[in-house]
Amino acid sequence: MKIDLEVSEPVNYSSGDHKYLVQKAAIKGVRSNPEQPFTYSSRDTPQEAIKYPHPKSRDGANTYAVQISEDVTPDESTTAAPSPFEDMSVRRGFIVKVFIILSVQLLCTMVIISIFVFCKPVRKWIIGIPWFMYALFPAVLVVIIVLACCRDIRRQVPANYILLALFTLLEGLMLGSMSIFYKAEEILWAAGATTLVTLVLTLFALQTKWDFTMLNGVMFVFLVVLMIYGIIALVVRSYWLHLIYSALGTLIFSMYLVMDVQMMVGGHYHYEIDPEEYIFAALNIYVDIINLFIFILDLIGR
């Protein structure tokens, strides 16, 4: 036996009108005129009707029920947009751009440090002006806050490149001022060790199945503890205290480097950086490498 279901007018299921339609319609075996359809209308929405044409004869024992259930359809406004990283060419171009910017930053920093270390007039000038390094720290802090917090600025060309170049210059000057207190061979050993650690950790971040991007909150807690530990180390002059502080700093920023590389690569990791945030990605990895260099230099110097 067939039952034809027909809705006289379209029903807007998203507005909930269908909840007032007939939930169950029982058709019993009663003889009726086949030309006259059986019609049932909702009390609240009389314009909607469900019509069931009756056959000439029907067995009274046979009962059929029709139940209308809500069909949930996804809202177009709430549908998540596809990730830009789904296109392999976009991801590949983003990674190449980040590594190019990062390479230029590191090269400029190495040149500035070399000038401070190997140029004796500059070295003497910095020794005669001890406040120079401390004056650079607020400027570096302001620029990095602007780049990290102002998304519109770091996406606007050429303002983002100018700010990043300014930050790299200030960071290089601050590292150069710090490097005059170490020997040249110690700086070279620290630079070589930092390069080796960076390469190994980058390859590890690209190959491992561990998702370090999930540790973002944990790493922030470790960083706060390291800062508090550093303040204590400034007050308490202890060789072993400073040694442990440098070792902890090296470990924490090594994990930060792995996490930032995975966020840059994206794909199957939990968190990823938007392809338009190439300045932000380069800034994160650059800061990780510079902090690694500082802590490794302190370890070698001690």
Image (cartoon, rainbow, N blue to C red):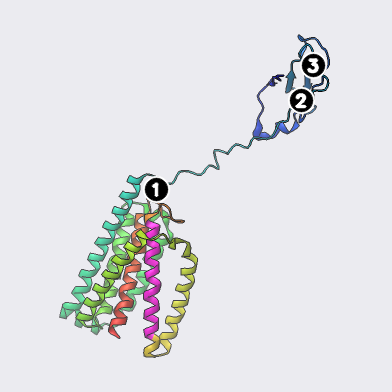
Q: Is residue 255 magenta?
A: yes
The span shown in magenta is 242-264
71 over 267 or under it: above or below = above
Q: Secondary structure at mark 2?
A: loop
Q: Quadrant of residue 248?
A: bottom left
Name the residue located 27 percent from the left edge and 63 percent from the top edge.
105
Indicate which disc, 3 or 2, sits on the residue closer to the N terminus. 3
Find out whether the residues at labels 2 and 1 contact each other: C-beta distance under 8 Å: no
Residue 45 visible in the current orientation? yes
In the picture of the structure, the residue carrying the numbered disc 2 is 64
Residue 81 at x, y percent in the picture = 48, 43
230 over 195 or under it: above or below = below
70 over 137 or under it: above or below = above
Residue 141 visible in the current orientation? no
Front residue of 140 and 209: 209
Q: Please identify, in this view, whether the residue under mark 2 or under mark 1 is nearer the observer.
A: 2
Front residue of 242 and 160: 242
In the picture of the structure, the residue carrying the numbered disc 1 is 85
In the picture of the structure, the residue carrying the numbered disc 3 is 58
- Report the amino acid beneath label 1: Phe
Q: Tell me the crowding category of disc 1: few under 14, some 14 to 19, or many 20 or more residues within 10 angstroms, Cα based.
A: some
Q: Tell me the crowding category of disc 2: few under 14, some 14 to 19, or many 20 or more residues within 10 angstroms, Cα based.
A: few
Q: Quadrant of the C terminus?
A: bottom left
Q: Secondary structure at mark 1?
A: helix
Does the magenta stretch mainly form a helix, a strand or a loop?
helix
